[in-house]
Amino acid sequence: MELRRSVITGGPVPVLPSWLTEPLWGQFAALLPERSTYAPTRPLGCHRPRISDRIVFDKMLQLLRFGCSYQAIADTTCSTTTIRNRRDEWIRHGVFAKPKQITLESYDRIVGLVLDQIAVDGSITKAPGGGEVAGRSPVDRGKQGLKRSGVTDGYGIPLGRVLAGANRHDSPLLAPTLDRLEDLGPLPDDITVHLDAGYDSDKTRAELAARGLHGRIAHKGEKAPIQESQRWHVERTHAWQNAFHRLARCYECRATVINAFFDLADTIIIARSLIRRAWTTHRWEDRPRRP
């Protein structure tokens, strides 16, 4: 794993702990398309070999975690062009979306998703580069911003998201956000959706009723601690996602690339939660020393 030097101590700082990186890489490697070391057009193999997928994977983790530019992360082992080309190739093959789905199914099988209590909320982050899903931010003096409307289970496991401009209201994004639940398969008969006061409208209640969902919505103008409902789980998930600096300050312009980085971040969050929650109930060969 590529290491980043700490400015204060001068010591190596890993992007992610090895007990989390290695399982992630193992799953990604199983989904990568097979490619020869040398291009088929050069049968003699007398030119530069193809850059290892593991090197590019480590670069993608660094981009996600540190939020730096492609030029800053490129070095003698991997160029900017290679990172971008491999990123686009993996997006076309669904290499970012599939591990999230596999990790989510594993979490549901081992720990169990709390699907009878879900939470939906939006979060606005900066998008200085603009792009397909950026808009004028009402909380940042009209600068370009990105809004994500996310849905989580009762523990805070990310289930899906919808990207939109920062000038979009949360309420119209509720329906497409709830549509992300269809990918989970059979759902409980009795589901409660926890929402903040931004969703307090007759249109929201009609939407929930049409889907057979119960809504627990904070009322406008009434002070209520966030702990009174289970809405804080989605707030915590937004904080987990914003810890990846590329999501908190997004310079990507294409929605497919932004979703790819979100899928990678969600995969890390779900795998980390799975390992930590299974630490006291399961034993495996590479089990970390502490949860």
Image (spheres, rainbow, N blue to C red):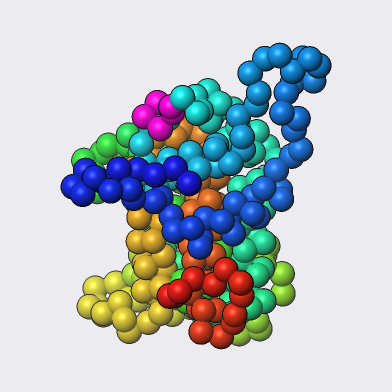
Identity of the residue furthest to the left in this view: 8
How far across and how far down the image is residue 163, in percent?
48, 48
Residue at the image point whose x is 64% and y is 54% from the top: 26
How far across and how far down the image is residue 46, in percent?
71, 14
Indicate left or right for 148 with 86 as reference.
Answer: left
Residue at the image point whose x is 33% and y is 48% from the top: 12
Between 235 and 68, the residue placed more toward the observer is: 68
How far across and how far down the image is residue 2, in percent?
44, 42
Up the image or down, 213 lies above or below 79; here it is below
How far across and how far down the image is residue 10, in percent?
24, 45
Q: Quadrant of the C terminus?
A: bottom left
Up the image or down, 263 lies above or below 49; here it is below
Q: Is residue 247 visible?
A: no
Query: Which stretch appears magenta?
Result: 71-75
Numbered-mark total: 0
Residue at the image point whose x is 48% and y is 58% from the top: 18
Indicate the quadrant where residue 218 lies.
bottom left
Indicate left or right for 34 with 55 as reference.
Answer: right
Between 16 and 129, the residue placed more toward the observer is: 16
Residue at the image point whose x is 66% and y is 68% from the top: 105
Up the image or down, 183 lies above or below 98; here it is below
Per the picture, the main secondary structure of the magenta-coloured stretch is helix
Indicate left or right for 40 with 261 as reference.
Answer: right
Q: Is residue 144 visible?
A: yes
The question of residue 85 being in magenta is answered with: no
